[in-house]
Image (cartoon, helix red, strand yellow):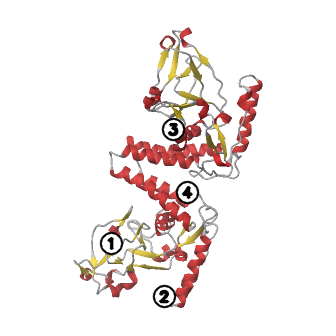
Amino acid sequence: MDTKKLRQKVLDLAIHGKLVNQDPNDEPASILLDRIRAEKVRLVKEGKIKKSDLIEKPISEEEIPFEVPEGWEWCKLSKISLDSADGPFGSNLKKEHYTNRKEVRIIQLSNIGESGWKDSNVKYTTFDYLPNIARSEAFAGDIIIAKMMPAGRAIICPNEDKKYVLSSDAVRFNFPSYLDNKYLYYAINSAVFKTQVYGEVQGVTRVRTSLNKLRTYFIPLPPLAEQRRIVKAVDELFEQIDIIERSEKELEEAANKTRDKLLNLAIQGHLVPQDPNEEPASVLLERIRAEKARLVKEGKLKKKDLEEKPISPDEIPFDIPEGWVWTCMKECNYFMSSQEDPTKKPEKQYELYSVPTFETGMPEFVKGKEISSSKVIVQKNDVLLCKINPHLNRSWVVSHYNEELPCIASSEWIVFRNHYISPKYLRYCFISPYFKNLMMSNVSGVGGSLMRAQPVSVAKYLFPLPPLSEQRRIVTKLEELLQEIDKLKA
């Protein structure tokens, strides 16, 4: 599995405002910027920074790579940092200035790791020499950025040694305490920042950047409360990815957790951007209701299938984007029960959709004489939902239908049919942790394999319905990401 790509996807979701929900009650980032400017004005008066540090060239509309949520701001590093510096020239920190004593730890390129601080290639200079390069002193919590190999990679300065100083190939940024430095660390390591760095790097074999350039690059800044929520969410996802990288034994569990998180992000509207020009899901729902009304008139559905129970605000489990709607399985399902008694055609062959078939992925063909009871006939794009343990909430999309070789579903499945909803999106919704928790909370039976969900209860379950075009984008993105996870098993 390409865990680097997966980490970047997590960071990409984070800085787009798609990893956690926004809270309109959060203090907006513009207030943070006002506070930073006021503090910088004070530092100018105290002579600690220059007046020129207050001068900011605004970010043009053409420079902004994407829209951020309300309450966020695009900011250059120079605007949100109180101080920055690079390492001393090589001539100012030579080998004769090193010491074997644990005094001032030198931060080198080899310490700026891909996933944070790397405690390797340990080198120190003396406390006595530090005043000569005081401008390059780094402090715990500073963001340290590499000028090269690779340019733009960032870490947070640790708090393990008494003092730190930069080497010539590193820079530091000191941000105010009312910004979350771990969010800043994640944002600087994201693709949007790297794109800016590599758009202006110098050199061929050893590309490098500079402090002056890094100061002009920008990141999206959320409200402080949301910064903390993002950090928590990224930490949780990265922890799962860390497990993938370090333990073959825990590989399957970590992949499943990552998959579940992606599925939940998808059905909450955080996996792909919304398009305000798309036909909203409410129109889609009206079309579905009209189709069901037609089927009732034709006698293919019962009038009670049109009955709808309004969804109260208390029932809604989480917020969804504008243009989405909450609906229930019954309201969207117009499956017409069609059964066949295979025993009346003992030599006729059928393709059987059973749980073992689902597990192996191998087609299962049976003759009528081998089947003991009537079975449901399913069509292409029907979505099957398993209702019994240990396969509860497993789901399958029927991929084909042949009148000469009818597809029949075993009794483990609930059948869902709707030509106006992406069957793959619906399947992803069914296999999400959200939907599994719904089913597990409404099972009947003693326990273990005897536990099962009742179709009458499942029909009432709520699920989030996006516009059709967004459903398709979600499916495409999920398939791409889940394919990366599946490579772990290869």
Q: Please, what is the three-letter code of the amino acid marked with disc 3?
A: Met
The residue carrying pointer 1 sits among few (fewer than 14), some (14 to 19) or many (20 or more) residues within 10 Å by Cα, namely: few
Relative height, residue 409 to residue 473 (above, below): above
Choose the circle earlier in sequence order: 3 or 1: 1
Choose the circle earlier in sequence order: 4 or 2: 4
According to the picture, the residue beneath numbered tag 4 turns out to be 20
- Look at the image and tell me in which quarter the C terminus lies: top left
Residue 444 can be seen in this image: yes
According to the picture, the residue beneath numbered tag 2 turns out to be 48
Q: Nearer the viewer, residue 53 or 227?
A: 227
Q: Residue furthest right?
A: 297
- The secondary structure type at the circle numbered 4 is loop
According to the picture, the residue beneath numbered tag 3 turns out to be 440
The residue carrying pointer 3 sits among few (fewer than 14), some (14 to 19) or many (20 or more) residues within 10 Å by Cα, namely: some
Q: In the rendering, which numbered label is found on residue 106?
A: none
Relative height, residue 66 to residue 60 (above, below): above
